[in-house]
Image (cartoon, rainbow, N blue to C red):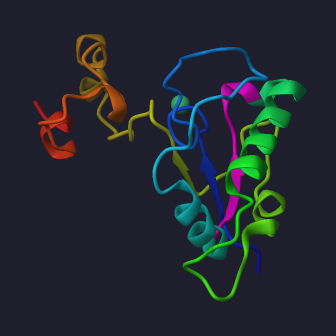
Amino acid sequence: MLKPILCLDFDGVIHSYTSGWQGAGIAADPPVAGTLEYLVEATKHYRVMVYSSRSKSLAGRRAMRRYIREHFNVPLTFSPVHDVDWLHEAIRFPWFKPPALLTIDDRALTFTGNWLDFAPEKLRRFQPWNKRPATLSTEQVGHD
Ligand SMILES: [Mg+2]
């Protein structure tokens, strides 16, 4: 049986995106801490697909694939079973939004079924994880 699809955003999730948008083919910032370990674990349970605003261009898809290969093709010291030469092959980069079971994105909200939770004045206060004040926890930021 096929594993379910887990869709990951790229900028702000895998690629730290500290320099902001440099073009679809450019991803020059370091990975978000823990990404390699997460990808190794996630690919055991899910078909991991990276889908981003970059995905619509061939240059963008190539840049994301190259990024995974260049940053994560290192021998694992924490797993006796794998090295990660396979990792950039295990991860897919579709040009369309995949039919994912779940999506992880730094700029998305989980729909609650109540549109009042998404009033424009509330959306204006949204901050991605890397822009939030360090003193606030996720729970504090998520509730008014
Ligand atoms: Mg993003």
Which quadrant of the rendered structure holds the N terminus?
A: bottom right
Q: Is residue 131 left or right of residue 91?
A: left
Position of residue 27 measured from the top left corner of the image (x, y, whole percent): 68, 29
Q: Is residue 119 left or right of residue 66?
A: left
**Is 49 inside the magenta-drawn segment?**
yes
Q: Is residue 112 left or right of residue 108?
A: left
14 vs 94, nearest the viewer? 14
Which quadrant of the rendered structure holds the C terminus?
A: top left
Q: Residue at x 67, y 32 (%)?
A: 52
96 vs 54, nearest the viewer? 54
Q: Furthest-bottom residue in view?
A: 80
Tally the numbered discs: 0
Q: Residue at x 70, y 71 (%)?
A: 75
Q: Residue at x 73, y 26 (%)?
A: 54
Q: Residue at x 54, y 17 (%)?
A: 20
Up/down of 34 relative to 139, above or below? below
Up/down of 122 relative to 41, above or below? above
Up/down of 82 relative to 19, above or below? below
- Residue 117 figure quarter: top left
Which region is colored magenta? 46-54
Q: Is residue 107 left or right of residue 36?
A: left
Up/down of 12 relative to 23, above or below? below
Position of residue 11 measured from the top left corner of the image (x, y, whole percent): 57, 32
**Is 80 inside the magenta-drawn segment?**
no
Position of residue 123 measured from the top left corner of the image (x, y, whole percent): 31, 18
